[in-house]
């Protein structure tokens, strides 16, 4: 092929755009994985909290419920705020209380069920105290049963 020069050869350009697209897609995917790993690093030292209501099952009438906030080892947590709100059972308002030195918060609940409803639930959330505590998973709630 005498007379051909490299600067006039257009064949190398044919595969270049698809290679750039593939490199871009792989790069974005890798960046997304790295960002996900980096954003999860601050949660390694966090302790998930849960609730232990007593009693767990109540009737639709005024009832005092003691809620213990615990860590995964079962250790009671002080100075956490427990928030009760209606889920499938209704509460007139959101109720909340702070845990004492034994990790127990007492809530005065008066749940109601709708007509023809035999059972419902009250959800419990935790506002953790200062420290490495989190409440990201669902907590044990309270079941309301109409006898």
Image: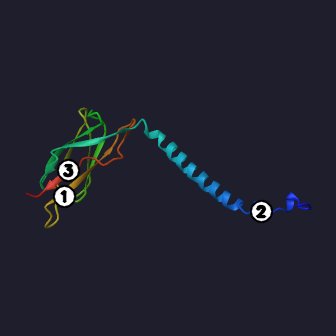
- Residue in the picture at 47% in, 43% down: 40
Is residue 62 shown left or right of residue 47?
Answer: left
**Which circle marks residue 142 in the picture?**
3
Q: Quadrant of residue 88?
A: bottom left
In the rendered image, the quadrant that contains the N terminus is bottom right
The figure's colour scheme reads: rainbow
Q: Nearer the viewer, mark 3 or mark 2?
A: 2
Is residue 120 shown left or right of residue 37?
Answer: left
Q: CA distance from mark 2 to mark 1?
A: 71 Å
- Residue in the picture at 50% in, 44% down: 37
Is residue 126 shown left or right of residue 14?
Answer: left
Residue 83's spot in the image, x, y percent? Answer: 28, 48
Residue 135 higher or lower than 120, as above or below = above
Residue identified by numbered label 2: 11
Residue 130 higher or lower than 30, as above or below = above
Q: Give the structural element (helix, strand or loop) at label 3.
A: strand
Q: Quadrant of residue 114?
A: bottom left
Question: Are the residues at dot 2 and dot 1 in contact (C-beta closer than 8 Å)?
Answer: no
């Amino acid at each position: 092929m005498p007379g051909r020069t490299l600067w006039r050869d257009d064949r190398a350009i044919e595969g270049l755009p698809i290679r750039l697209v593939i490199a871009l897609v792989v790069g974005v995917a890798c960046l997304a994985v790295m960002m996900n790993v980096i954003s999860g690093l601050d949660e390694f030292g966090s302790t998930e909290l849960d609730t232990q209501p007593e009693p767990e099952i109540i009737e639709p009438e005024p009832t005092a419920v003691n809620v213990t906030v615990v860590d995964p080892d079962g250790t009671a947590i002080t100075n956490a705020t427990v928030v009760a709100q209606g889920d499938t059972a209704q509460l007139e308002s959101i109720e909340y209380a702070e845990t004492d030195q034994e990790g127990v918060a007492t809530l005065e609940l008066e749940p109601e069920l709708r007509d023809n409803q035999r059972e419902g639930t009250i959800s419990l959330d935790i506002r953790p105290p200062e420290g490495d505590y989190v409440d990201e998973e669902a907590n044990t709630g309270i079941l309301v049963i109409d006898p």
